Amino acid sequence: MFKNENGNNMTPIINIGVLGSNALWMKREDFIPFSFGGNKARKAKLFFEEIDLGNYDCVVTYGGSHSNHCRVVANMAARRKMPCYLVEPKEVSDPTFNRSLMDLFDAQIITVPVEEVHETLENLLENLKLHGMTPYFIPGGGHGNIGTQAYVDCYEEIKTFEYQDNIKFDYIFLASGTGTTQAGLVCGQIINQDKRHIVGISIARKSPYGRDIIVESVKSYLTQIDDKTADKYVEFIDCYTGQGYGKENDEIIRTIKNVILQYGIPLDSTYTGKAFYGMNNYLKDNRIENKNILFIHTGGTPLFFDDIRKLKG
Ligand SMILES: *Cc1c(COP(=O)(O)O)cnc(C)c1O
């Protein structure tokens, strides 16, 4: 970690070389020093600051076996010896290292068909309360204003870096899932009135649904903002989602292999690998040249190891 002038920790931004005629930088959110880091660690830290005020005695959230969010939350709960309940959709319950880690952290995992997740969560929360518990509920992926706040903070780190290193990023690319990370960055951009492109590469959701959620998140955080402004800043690209959440293709696998061989940086096929592949294509398709590009490495390191056998081919 690096420190900014206030002595706060910042994840590093490293120059990793060129992509065509563009200069490529990467913000290493995977270096956040808790539970393999990533954007879910940055968000969960803020949720647990609320929990640590002392009014709750267990945590409830949801996500599939690929979920970095569930891993980090389970680890943070384990550290506090606090029971953690995870509701998992059966459709994404294949064995992963994240799932093994959730087991290691003793999370109680309840697997149900995806259409029953919502009801299961409601019943679970009700049951816990009936048993005298006070659960803290975290929306999937750390969605909501607290999660958005985490990436407004991250945007400020980017600003600090730009100021210190006398550089301006013309484009910021990232993997967009629930859209909270993108919403936070966009709020940061609007607050600072910066001109640049923040491009979310969707890893599953399609427009308009995926995009609308980000616009809603921006409006929920920046309550003064009008619809048109929020709308203008959200660039959500849904043409690199492949076969959907957690499903890769050969080109994504090739991208991941290139990046680890060339730069020594692990990506994964659910999130960062897909986004990096999407970014490559976006830059080519839109003939973007001679720009400074920042890719946000949003973490997910355990997922890299799930893919490792596929990389061998
Ligand atoms: C969850 C996740 C994302 C997507 O973040 P959202 O805020 O849900 O859009 C991207 N990358 C990784 C590694 C993730 O775990």
Image (cartoon, rainbow, N blue to C red):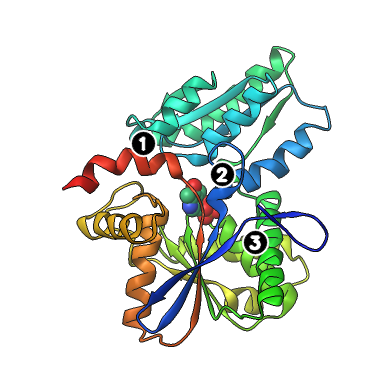
- Residue, disc 3: 184
Question: Dot 2 lies on which element?
Answer: loop
Q: Is residue 204 visible?
A: no
Percent x, y for residue 260?
Answer: 34, 54
What is the CA distance from the residue labelled 1 to the residue labelled 2? 22 Å
Most extreme residue toward the left is: 313
Q: Which mark is residue 37?
A: 2
What is the CA distance from the residue labelled 3 to the residue labelled 1? 27 Å
Amino acid of disc 3: Gly
> Badge 2 local density, few (<14 within 10 Å), some, or many (20+)?
many
Q: Which mark is residue 106?
A: none
> Badge 1 local density, few (<14 within 10 Å), some, or many (20+)?
some
In the rendered structure, which disc, 2 or 3, sits on the residue that comes first in sequence? 2
Closer to us: 59 or 262: 262
Indicate yes or no: mark 3 CB to ligand 1 under 8 Å.
yes
- Image-quadrant location for residue 282: bottom left
Q: Residue at x 23, y 55 (%)?
A: 249
Which circle, 1 or 2, is nearer the viewer? Answer: 2
Q: Are marks 1 and 2 in contact (CB under 8 Å)?
A: no
Indicate yes or no: mark 1 CB to ligand 1 under 8 Å.
no
Closer to us: 45 or 206: 45
Percent x, y for residue 24?
Answer: 46, 73
Amino acid of disc 2: Gly
Percent x, y for residue 110?
Answer: 47, 22
Q: Which mark is residue 92?
A: 1
Say above or below: 223 vs 8. below
Q: Is residue 279 left or right of residue 222?
A: left
Q: Are marks 2 and 3 in contact (CB under 8 Å)?
A: no
Most extreme residue toward the top is: 131
In the rendered structure, which disc, 3 or 1, sits on the residue that comes first in sequence? 1
Q: Is residue 248 left or right of residue 33?
A: left
Amino acid of disc 1: Val
